[in-house]
Amino acid sequence: MSTYVYAITGADHPLRLDDLQGVGDPPSPLRTVISGPVAAVVSDAPPGLRAKRRDVVAHESVLEALMADGATLPMRFGLLGPDDERVAEVLGRDARSYQERLAELDGHVEYHLKAARDEQDMLLEIMAGSEEARELNRRTRTDPGAHDDRIALGELVAREVAARGEAQAEETTKRLAPAAARLSRGEPGATHFLNVSFLVPTASTDTFLHAVREEAERLGEGYSFTLTGPLPPYSFV
């Protein structure tokens, strides 16, 4: 049977697992695989594992309990190894790397921030600042056959939206970076221009949250921020 891996810790971690339950129905008992200075918290992998709410919650609960007791490298839901022996082999081979990363993440949590701009607000700003956009818009309104102008206007607006979003993402990230230890940029999406994870010292979370609130207030009502956390530092493992 495959081995389901929840996290990697130091071998000196308390590893209090008695009150925790693993994934599966019925829940799989947790155990540890230790190799020198590091350990993995694992269980048997149930057949047909899917990201059902019960199993995702069980996975997260194990991580939260481990992180509360010491430095932990969280694995994402669904990570499997062939068996305990193979997990131990990987632990032993990369023990030094795991120890370095554990030291780096000790006492830190992750916050994930997405930011979006109101489309109408952005369009009005583009029209106000671009004579070319205003002229193309005028032509499309007065000439039903201005097909090429409609294409040109759409392309111009798309370029402006991308450029302005990229510039604002860079500015916002620079303003928030001093409140975090590290950051990890993600790709923006169709509905948001900013997608960044921040590694924040647990003792400094209030400072970071205050910085996010200040940035949201600075940008104003045309922007919306979605902040998720504190999370296990998945983006920095």
Image (cartoon, rainbow, N blue to C red):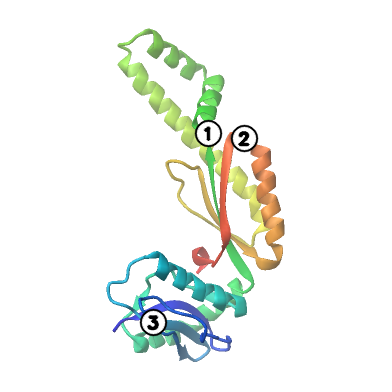
On the image, which quarter does residue 46 sit in? bottom left
Q: Is residue 20 above or below residue 141?
A: below
Residues under numbered marks 2 and 3 in contact, where contact means CB atoms less than 8 Å apart: no
The quadrant of the rendering that contains the N terminus is bottom left
In terms of depth relative to the viewer, which is nearer, 210 or 145?
210
On the image, which quarter does residue 138 sit in? top left
Left or right, residue 132 beside residue 202: left
Left or right, residue 83 beside residue 32: left
Q: Is residue 85 above or below residue 118?
A: below
Residue found 37% across the figure and 70% down from its top: 78
On the image, which quarter does residue 209 sit in? bottom right
First in residue order: circle 1 vs circle 2 = 1
Residue 206, x across and y down, in percent: 71, 59
Question: In the rendering, which numbered label is found on residue 221?
Answer: 2
Q: Secondary structure at mark 2?
A: loop
Residue 205 in sight in this render: yes
Residues under numbered marks 1 and 2 in contact, where contact means CB atoms less than 8 Å apart: yes
Question: In the rendering, which numbered label is found on residue 118?
Answer: 1
Amino acid type at circle 1 is: Asp
First in residue order: circle 2 vs circle 3 = 3
Q: Secondary structure at mark 1?
A: loop
Residue found 61% across the figure and 45% down from its top: 172
Question: In the rendering, which numbered label is found on residue 151?
Answer: none
Q: Tell me if mark 1 has few (under 14), some (14-19) or many (20+) residues whose alpha carbon lies within 10 angstroms of its own.
A: few
Amino acid type at circle 2 is: Glu
Mark 3 = which residue? 28
